[in-house]
Amino acid sequence: MNWDQWRDEFPVTQNRIFLDHAKVAPLPKRVQDRVAAFLQDASEHGTANYAKWMAETDRVRARFAELINADEDEVAFVKNTSEGISIVANGIDWKEGDNVVIPNIEFPANVYPWMNLKRLGVEVRWVKSVRGRVPFEQIAAQVNNRTRVVSVSSVECNSGFRNDLNRIGAFCKEKGIYFCVDAIQSLGVLPMDVKKDHIDFLAADGHKWLLSVEGLGGFYISKRVLENIYPAVVGWDSVVNAGDYLNYDFTFRPGARRFEEGSFNVMSIFAFGAALDVLLEVGIDNIEQRVKGLGDVIMERVKQRGGKVVNSTEPGERSGIVSFTLNCDLEKLKTFLAGTNVSLTIRDGLIRLSPHCYNNPSDIDHCFDHIDQFLKK
């Protein structure tokens, strides 16, 4: 793999050492070009090419399905991860006393949609993490005969712990429990197979490892559970004869598109499609291998400076995130690095680096050169 070739795809490399893809990623040049072409088309021709725009939305939907090994009619566009999870949370026919099981270190996108069900008498049962890990045994221990959903992140946002989706999914299938996944910290850097892992629902915005813009992502709902989730939000495009505006037929579309209730964010779909094209051309397996190799370099640099690596180093539990601590004032380090050309995240007592495949070991060394400048002050 010629990684220098793919590095040229990212203009950010001319200006910054960007190691923060677990936050908001810089855009590939292909995304910039695809969006610019759409804007030019819309500016110069109005909606004359609208049919081509809709053909592109179908193509991008199929590309997202390919990324996660879903069928095309099982995926829909959403504006973000929270919306996708909320589709599930608000669509289940809950009974008072039912519960949902989630880890206690989830990003709020996978917390508040479930907590919002308290008004219906639905309990949130918390899985206690252990040093940033979510032990499967703790998940199983929280499940009882009133559990309707287990919802986890594919990768935990701070610790970078990679949940064993296959084991959790098989457990949920055996128990007759819905399995929901917030995949925003793994899609684009780790392989995903919703069928192999028995996933019922998955959601992810495109602005992190997927290298796209904020406000547009993908949602998956298995066709085996589609009819069990009632669309809580509907609009003109939710129904079978959406184009026949004044013939009111309230029959939902047969697949996941029933959750796309109105007009598309076409410009962002063009961006999403361009980013997916880049990722699928490089190959997710290649990306995973590259990013984990860069993670090895980061962990070695941390150890050389007497720091402590917090993320799991077990092969099946690793992700693209490396979290660590150093013996220094992290808030002052954060302020110091803000004045450099290095992008990373410092929060909750951790330093988090998240390189993508176009990064290289020199980027990491430059990052630690800046950290060394601070440590020597």
Image: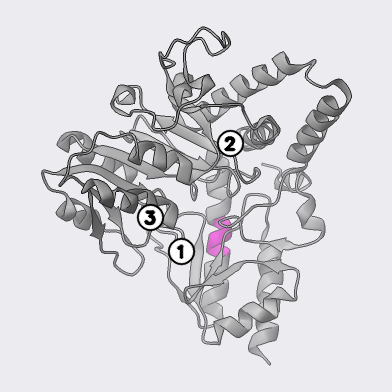
* Residue that mark 1 sits on: 158
The 10 Å Cα crowd at callout 3, few under 14, some 14 to 19, many 20 or more, is: some
Looking at the picture, how far across and down is residue 32, in whole percent? 78, 40
Above or below 55: residue 18: below
Marks 3 and 1 in Cβ contact (< 8 Å):
no
CA gap, disc 3 and disc 1: 14 Å
Which kind of residue does numbered mark 3 sit on? Glu
**Mark sitting on residue 283:** 2
Provide the major secondary structure of the magenta segment.
helix
Q: Residue furthest bottom?
A: 377
Picture quarter with the N terminus: top right
Amino acid type at image mark 2: Gly
Sequence-first tag of 2 and 3 = 2
Q: What x and y, as percent, mark residue 168?
A: 26, 44
Nearer to us: label 3 or label 1: 1
Q: Earlier in the sequence, mark 3 or mark 1?
A: 1
Instruction: Give the amino acid at mark 1.
Output: Asn
Which residues, given as a range, are shown in magenta?
A: 293-297
